[in-house]
Image (spheres, rainbow, N blue to C red):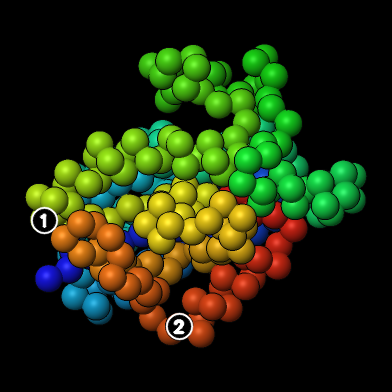
Amino acid sequence: MTTKLVLLRHGESAWNQENRFTGWTDIGLTEKGILEAKRAGTLLSEGGYSFDIVYTSLLKRAILSANLVLDELQLLWLPVQRSWRLNERQYGALQGLDKMETVARHGKEQVFLWRRSYDVPPPPLALDDPRHPKQDPRYARLAPDLIPATECLKDVVSRVLPFWYDVIVPELRDNKRILVVAHGNSLRAFVKHLDTIPDDEIAELNIPTGIPLVYELDSNLRPVTHYYLGDPDEAEKAAAAVAAQAGSGH
């Protein structure tokens, strides 16, 4: 018997649409993003999915997507736990910048290195920069050394894995049905861990917005299989669209 875990990247955000690096900036959903989240809920409902608990980041594009999914499932009453550990990758000084303009300024190779290398972070935010998360009340109780001024994917993996082991794993072992609604890079961290993807291959992984990704796990919580709900060709095209962008800091 397998245990199912569902991962969902939030619907399209305004800065996804504008092709900007978003990171920890709290940007809302577009009309398309709202429809994507609702459709994700429909796909889950049609597939007979239900949940006992939902986890999201502290960013409203994930929170709103989770609420829209739960509304479609008639499960808005479910407990939702939010954690900064599920936030998008902190894109540092790139946050808010147009990706194509950033490529024009710094060169395609440098921008690709910042956004897709496993262990090279973008330039950090200065402590007095209003974009720095230490200025945000939602992170006021975090120890200063936990609040990132920039992150590479390796850093995201390091903050996501404690949440996996300390929070999600015990609930899965207790047979809880779990939905995680998060972001392109925090979900890439989960997928890298689950599928043991090598550091030098994770750059090729693209997760589309608004399409539920289902993992079936064995008794050791290792993947037996995984798949997107709905039309496989649609999921493949959506992932290719992510890959075609100048960046993926959503």
For the residue pair 170 and 65, the one nearer the viewer reads as: 170
Residue type (three-letter) at the residue carrying disc 2? Pro
Mark 2 secondary-structure assignment: helix
Q: Which residue is drawn at 90% across and 44% down?
A: 105
Q: Earlier in the sequence, mark 2 or mark 1?
A: 1
Does residue 65 show up?
no
Q: Nearer the viewer, mark 2 or mark 1?
A: 1
Decide: is 193 above or below 128: below
Decide: is 1 above or below 188: below
Residue 225 image offset from top left, x and y in percent: 32, 73
| Residue under numbered circle 2 | 232
Q: Which residue is drawn at 9% across and 50% down?
A: 174
- Quadrant occupied by the N terminus: bottom left
Task: Name the disc covering residue 147, or none.
Answer: none
Mark 1 secondary-structure assignment: loop
Number of marks in picture: 2
Q: Residue at x 62, y 31 (%)?
A: 150
For the residue pair 195 and 239, the one nearer the viewer reads as: 195
Categorize mark 1 by other alpha carbons within 10 Å: few (<14), some (14-19), many (20+). Answer: few
Categorize mark 2 by other alpha carbons within 10 Å: few (<14), some (14-19), many (20+). Answer: few
| Residue under numbered circle 1 | 175
Q: Residue at x 33, y 53 (%)?
A: 180
C-alpha separation, residue under disc 2 versus residue under disc 1: 28 Å
